[in-house]
Amino acid sequence: MPFAVSDSVSQVLAAALDGVSLRQQVIADNLANVDTPGFRATSVDFESQLKAAISDGSFDAGTPVETGATTTPTDTPVGANGNNVDLRKEAMAAVQSQFQYQILTRAVTDKFNVIKTAVSGQ
């Protein structure tokens, strides 16, 4: 986890950051192999398990929870060389995951600023 986890909100943010980071790595791998014969693109799902963990109360203060991000092959049609990487789809996914990452890091910054304000009394 990228930062100290002291409460359930921090745990959710940390798990979401981990999931988005994995997604960015998978997208980068897909893009790097856009011309590799026989390469099959994969995608990452962490939102469904994160949502389930939040719903069932799996996040307890101080106890790290793994949300089990999964990678699965995409169902994009395969081209003549056996490769199914769709450059437009991957580029869009890269932009979307970058926005998600920016939102999550902003939420972490805001959370730490609230704690800093509470501790300093200002």
Image (cartoon, helix red, strand yellow):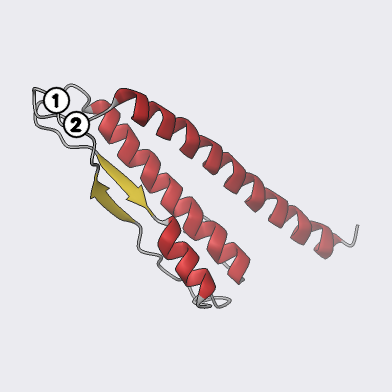
Could you tell me the amino acid type at mark 2?
A: Asn
**Horizontal placement of 49 versus 106: left or right?**
left
Tags 2 and 1 touching, CB below 8 Å:
yes
Figure check: 118 above or below 28: below
Name which residue lies at 24% across and 30% down.
85
Q: Position of residue 24 (x, y in %)?
A: 39, 39
Disc on the earlier residue, 2 or 1: 1
Q: How many marks?
A: 2
In the drawing, what numbered circle is on residue 39? none
Residue in the foreground of this view, choosing between 77 and 105: 77
Q: Position of residue 105 (x, y in %)?
A: 60, 46
Mark 2 vs mark 1, CA separation in Å: 6 Å
Figure check: 45 above or below 8: above
Could you tell me the amino acid type at mark 1?
A: Gly
Residue found at the very far right of the displayed protein = 122
Quarter in which the C terminus is drawn = bottom right
Q: Position of residue 58 (x, y in %)?
A: 49, 77
Name which residue lies at 42% across and 60% down.
48
Q: Which residue is mark 1?
A: 79
Q: Tell me if residue 79 can be seen.
A: yes
> For mark 1, does the 10 Å Cα neighbourhood hold few (<14), some (14 to 19), or many (20 or more) residues?
few
Name which residue lies at 65% across and 50% down.
107
Q: Position of residue 114 (x, y in %)?
A: 77, 57
> For mark 2, does the 10 Å Cα neighbourhood hold few (<14), some (14 to 19), or many (20 or more) residues?
many
Q: Tell me if residue 4 can be seen.
A: no
Q: Which residue is mark 2?
A: 84
Residue in the foreground of this view, choosing between 116 and 17: 17
Name which residue lies at 45% across and 56% down.
47
**Horizontal placement of 51 versus 120: left or right?**
left
- Circle 2 sits in a helix, a strand or a loop, which is it? loop
- Circle 1 sits in a helix, a strand or a loop, which is it? loop
